[in-house]
Amino acid sequence: MVKRSKPASLSLPGELAAGAAFLAKLHREPAVDKWVERVVRERVEFGGASLHGGEEKARFLRTFAAIFPVILRS
């Protein structure tokens, strides 16, 4: 069982933050923090699904990781 924790902040290197800002605009999200939150949430959900036999979602996640390796490495 996973307990919900308090909100936390994290810092990103300048290059990664600039890339996130660019992608947020590309996805028509005016607030980069909301875009990053959505991406992280999706990543966590897909990762959890892959642990529980969601092969299709796991395949999507591998594709996403191949396209956006910088976001997932940091």
Image (cartoon, grey):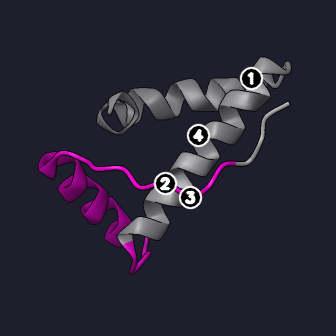
**Going from the N terminus, do you reach mark 4 or mark 2 first?**
2
Q: What stretch is highlighted in magenta?
A: 5-31
Location of the N terminus by quadrant is top right
Mark 2 surroundings: few (<14), some (14-19) or many (≥20) residues within 10 A = few
Displayed quadrant of residue 48: top right
54 left or right of 6? right
Q: In the image, what residue type sits under mark 3?
A: Pro
The image shows residue 52 at horizontal and vertical percentages of 85, 21
- Between marks 2 and 1, how big is the CA–CA gap? 25 Å
Evaluate if marks 2 and 3 touch, with contact meaning CB atoms under 8 Å apart.
Answer: yes
Taking depth in this image into account, of 14 and 28 the one nearest to the observer is: 14
- Between marks 2 and 3, how big is the CA–CA gap? 4 Å
SS for tag 2? loop
Residue 63 shown in magenta: no
Q: Is residue 19 above or below residue 45?
A: below
- Between marks 4 and 2, how big is the CA–CA gap? 17 Å
Query: Can you tell which mark lies on residue 43?
Result: 4
